[in-house]
Structures are given as structure tokens and as C-alpha cells.
């Protein structure tokens, strides 16, 4: 298949699943694509150093279902340009559709190592990494970053440097590094950035929890990226796609919700084995059922599920409670 960011941006507004550590594995991405096939999905971030040193060992972290997940973008993090180049080349050979560079993670451990959003304070190295990555592959290279360290004053020059180095699409999370995930996302600096670089696809990220949110915030941007707003609600991608492209949206029925919950659990078991899958699925099940009648009473059961039959039991009990 042919895939370029500019081509995608010209067709219609982009709706993307954000890369989220501990969440956006293959099972999560497949569920999102089943619900809304037009979504562009991003993998959890992966270490460029790890991929360059031991690609076969790290391969399991970037496994994907090519029949469902394309376009499939892998996000990598680090601070060594050579490692990025080697990792990107491995990923291209592995069959991914694009490389995204993480300049946005505010986690202390990541920033303390000089990775993620710490690169905002080192624009020369950030540009060098983009250039090395772009030179090593023929697939698209994009960057996800934040408004800045303390404020948005460095946003335009920082993004200008990485665009000049070869970045083909930019996603901006509307908070500073110091904010992390607190407060409200500020989208206004993104609009100014888009005016400065009208030919570069720019996505906005932060506080999208409905189609109405996306339609209100997108303004002149090329699309939106959704992260935490998708927890327990993969249908948000369908809702947002419909809102941005002026199409009718029908909320999922109780039956469809049950089918997706069941399918997510099955996909996790297929990709990770039952024991690990059920441990990980507990948090997803809590998110899926938040607000459902009877869910609070079942919380203890949901945090101790061990097999697919336990998931089925929760689905049936909640469905029964809704009918009462």
C-alpha cells in the first residue's frame, strides 16, 4: 500500500490513536481499527537503543496484524541519532508504515535519561535525530511533542528545526512538560504553528473526549490524536471521525459493547497468553464498564478475573442489570 502523511491529510481529517505505554498494544490497536477502520494507530513507544542493539529480542514489542492495523506507526524514543537510524531501518524492514519520534513523554524516568520531552531543551540534538532517522528510511517520519518546557514560547522555533530536518508530520500535546497531564490542554499555540507551516500536517492532542470536542478544537489543524479519552471507549474514534467528516454517528448498543469487550479479551489472550492477558485486561474491563448499572458491585470480581469465562460472566451480569 502507498501511505504518506500529506496524501492522508488531503483526503480527510486524520483521526489517530495516541501511543500510550501500557495500553496501545496490538490487541488495543485492533479493537480501535475494528470499531473505526479509518483510524491511524500508533504503537506504545519502544526504545531506539533496544531496537538497535537487540532487534530480534525487541521484535515482540512491535508485532502487529497487517490485515487490520495498517497504517501502523511505531513510536521510538532515545537520544542517540545512530540508534534511531538503525532502529528505524529495522522497523521499515519489519513492515511498519511510519516512524514517530517521541519528544513528548514527561515521565520523570524518561526525562531524567535525556529522552522524550527532555529533547525540547536540546533542539540541535532533536533535529539531528530526525535527520538521521529520515535519512535511513523511505517511510514517513513524524514527531510527537508538547507546547514547550515551561510555556509555548519555544514551540514554533523547535518545530521549525525538526521540520527542516525532515519531519513530515507533527503532533502537539497541548500541555507543557511541567504540566504533565494536569490542567487543561491549550490548543491555541497549535493554530499559530499551523499558520506558520501550512503545508505540514499538524495534529492536536489533549482533552478530546467526544466528537463535539474534536469539532470544536480542530480549527485549521489536519486532525486529532486521542489518548486517554479512548480508555474503555474505542467508539470515540468512530464518533470523532463522523463529527469531523460531517457524517451521522450511531452510539454502540449494549450488545455491541459486549462483543467488543469479549473480542478485546480474546485478542489479548491470542497475543500474550491467558495468564498475562487477564492480568492486563482487568484495567480495561474496569474502564469498559465504568458507569454501567451494577458495575460498582462487580468491581471486586473484575479486578480478579483469570479466564475468558470470568469476562463473559461480567458482561452477562451487566447486561442483565441494564435490562432491569
Image (spheres, helix red, strand yellow):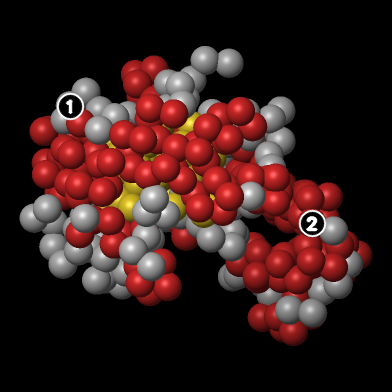
Q: Which residue is mark 2?
A: 272
- Please name the residue shown 46% across and 46% down the image: 83
Residue 10 sits in quarter: top left
- Left or right: 95 as drawn, with respect to 313: left
Badge 1 marks a residue whose secondary structure is loop
Is residue 230 visible in the rendered structure shown here?
no
Looking at the image, which is closer to me, 245 or 3? 3
State yes or no: discs 1 and 2 in contact (Cβ < 8 Å).
Answer: no
Q: CA distance from mark 1 to mark 2?
A: 42 Å
Q: Measuring 31% from the left and 59% from the top, which residue is drawn there?
A: 117
Q: Residue furthest left?
A: 153
Which residue is more in the foreground, 157 or 49? 49
The number of numbered badges drawn on the structure is: 2
Q: Quarter of the image containing the C terminus? A: bottom right
**In this rendering, would 239 be left or right of 193?**
right
Q: Position of residue 42 (x, y in %)?
A: 52, 43
Q: Which mark is residue 244?
A: none
Please tell me the numbered disc located at residue 198: 1
- The x, y position of residue 283, in whole percent, is 65, 70
Q: Position of residue 88 (x, y in %)?
A: 50, 36
Residue at point 66% right, 80% down? 296
Indicate the secondary structure of the residue bearing disc 2.
helix
Quarter of the image that includes the N terminus: top right
Q: Earlier in the sequence, mark 1 or mark 2?
A: 1
Horizontal relation, residue 129 to residue 254: left or right:
left
- The residue carrying pointer 1 sits among few (fewer than 14), some (14 to 19) or many (20 or more) residues within 10 Å by Cα, namely some
Amino acid at each position: 500500500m502507498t501511505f504518506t502523511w500529506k496524501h492522508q491529510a488531503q483526503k480527510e481529517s486524520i483521526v489517530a490513536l495516541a501511543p500510550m505505554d501500557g495500553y496501545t498494544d496490538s490487541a488495543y490497536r485492533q479493537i480501535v481499527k475494528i470499531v473505526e477502520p479509518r483510524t491511524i494507530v500508533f504503537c506504545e513507544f519502544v526504545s531506539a537503543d533496544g531496537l538497535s542493539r537487540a532487534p530480534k529480542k525487541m521484535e515482540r514489542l512491535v508485532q502487529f496484524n497487517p490485515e487490520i492495523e495498517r497504517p501502523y506507526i511505531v513510536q521510538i524514543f532515545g537520544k542517540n541519532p545512530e540508534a534511531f537510524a538503525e532502529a528505524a531501518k529495522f522497523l521499515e524492514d519489519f513492515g511498519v508504515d511510519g516512524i514517530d519520534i517521541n519528544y513528548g513523554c514527561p515521565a520523570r524516568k524518561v526525562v531524567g535519561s535525556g529522552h522524550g520531552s527532555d529533547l525540547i531543551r536540546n533542539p540541535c540534538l532533536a533535529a539531528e535525530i530526525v535527520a538521521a532517522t529520515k535519512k535511513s528510511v523511505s517511510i514517513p517520519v513524524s514527531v510527537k511533542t508538547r507546547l514547550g518546557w515551561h510555556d509555548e514560547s519555544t514551540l514554533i522555533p523547535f518545530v521549525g528545526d525538526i521540520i527542516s530536518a525532515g519531519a513530515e508530520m507533527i503532533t502537539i500535546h497541548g500541555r507543557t512538560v511541567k504540566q504533565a497531564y494536569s490542567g487543561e490542554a491549550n490548543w491555541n499555540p497549535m493554530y499559530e504553528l499551523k499558520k506558520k507551516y501550512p503545508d505540514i500536517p499538524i495534529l492536536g492532542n489533549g482533552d478530546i473526549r467526544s466528537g463535539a470536542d474534536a469539532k470544536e478544537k480542530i480549527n485549521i489543524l489536519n486532525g486529532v490524536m486521542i489518548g486517554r479519552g479512548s480508555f474503555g471507549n474505542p467508539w470515540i474514534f468512530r464518533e470523532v471521525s463522523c463529527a469531523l467528516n460531517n457524517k451521522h454517528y450511531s452510539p454502540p448498543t449494549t450488545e455491541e459493547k459486549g462483543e467488543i469487550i469479549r473480542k478485546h479479551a480474546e485478542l489479548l489472550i491470542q497475543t500474550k497468553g491467558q495468564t498475562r492477558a487477564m492480568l492486563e485486561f482487568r484495567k480495561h474491563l474496569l474502564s469498559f464498564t465504568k458507569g454501567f448499572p451494577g458495575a460498582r458491585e462487580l468491581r471486586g470480581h473484575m479486578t480478579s478475573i483469570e479466564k475468558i469465562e470470568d469476562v463473559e460472566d461480567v458482561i452477562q451480569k451487566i447486561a442483565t442489570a441494564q435490562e432491569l
